[in-house]
Amino acid sequence: MPDDLYKLSNYDYSFPKELIAQQPLPDRSASRLMVLNRESGEIKHSHFSSVTGYFAPGDCLVINDTKVIPANLDGKTEKTGSAISVLVLDNLKGNVWDVLMKNSRRVDEGDFVLFDGQIRLRVVKKRAGSWKPSLILNPMN
């Protein structure tokens, strides 16, 4: 697989917030379905209730049941003031959170990121693609 497949920047695009469903439809089968014909490139709009009509014998259906905490935070590095964007993925334990961080090359382990002047995030461990930071609330008190 190409290395750039795992670059977060490859999946960053503008999407109007008003088009993002905030709650599922009461009748989930009425959800919209976009169908791409990989041979022709044609895009067709349908409904999820017809999804089985697009499978052939031997196809495999993979269901993604992951959940994302709706927590996007924009901050800046304490050292230089560089812009940092964080997507909170999961609470690992106590105040330790797993996050994806844009512009993560601008901070090192042990550095702090500031949010709204009251929240400091200390980068505890750098990992490929995501980080394990510790959130420290109201550090000035």
Image: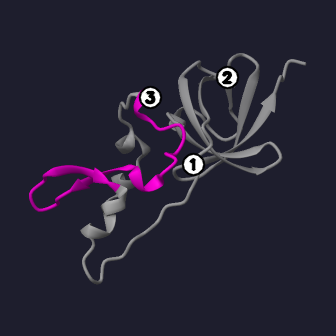
User: Tag on residue 17?
Assistant: 3
Which x, y percent locates residue 122?
72, 35
Which quarter of the image is occupied by the C terminus?
A: top right
Residue 1 visible in the current orientation: no
Residue appearing at x 25%, y 67% in the figure: 54
Above or below: residue 7 compared with residue 136 = below
Q: Secondary structure at mark 3?
A: helix
User: Tag on residue 118?
Assistant: none
Three-letter code, disc 3: Lys
Above or below: residue 140 compared with residue 30 = above
Residue at image mark 2: 115
Which x, y percent locates residue 97?
71, 45
Above or below: residue 68 compared with residue 17 = below
Residue appearing at x 39%, y 28% in the figure: 16
Residue at image mark 1: 130
Question: In the image, which residues are magenta?
Answer: 18-47
Which x, y percent locates residue 58?
29, 83
